[in-house]
Image: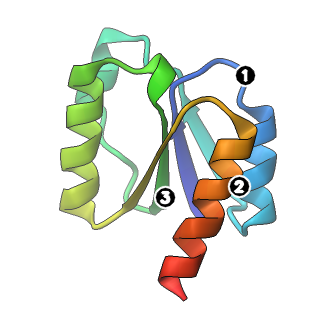
Amino acid sequence: MRALIVGGDYVEQISEALASHGYTRVEHWNGRKQGDTRRSIPSDVSLVVVLTDYTSHPLLKHLKSEAQRLGVSVLYSRRSLVEVRQRLDALERRAA
């Protein structure tokens, strides 16, 4: 499975947490570029992790509409490893 992390600079620990949940490929957008609000979510992404501390409102709106269009799950979190892990666990429980 493939995941996309949007926001933040140092996301290695979050990437490792995603890997422990079965996401073998993780892509990262820092969300600071003007063009990020026009980027499309890759079609093979099954989860988008949005680090809300580091993203603008226009980018959040764009990601939400793109994810709905593609039918991709979105996980909103602060840049906190503990919070990301809790939300990943909750997402897995809902899927089961």
Instruction: Tell which circle, 1 or 2, labels the residue nearer the N-terminal end.
Output: 1
Where residue 71 is drawn, which disc sits there?
A: none
Q: Secondary structure at mark 1?
A: loop
Relative vertical location of residue 54 with respect to residue 21 in this rendering, above or below: above
Where residue 10 is drawn, which disc sits there?
A: 1
Residue in the picture at 36% in, 63% down: 72
Identify the residue position indicated by label 2 in the image. 18
Q: Is residue 18 left or right of residue 43?
A: right
Q: Amino acid at mark 2?
A: Leu
Q: Amino acid at mark 3?
A: Leu
Q: Secondary structure at mark 2?
A: helix
Q: Is residue 36 left or right of residue 58?
A: right
The percent position of residue 49, horizontal first and vertical second, equals: 51, 45
Q: Rounded to the nearest whole Å, what is the CA distance between mark 1 and mark 2?
A: 14 Å
Where residue 47 is drawn, which disc sits there?
A: 3
Q: Rounded to the nearest whole Å, what is the CA distance between mark 1 and mark 3?
A: 19 Å
The percent position of residue 34, horizontal first and vertical second, equals: 30, 10
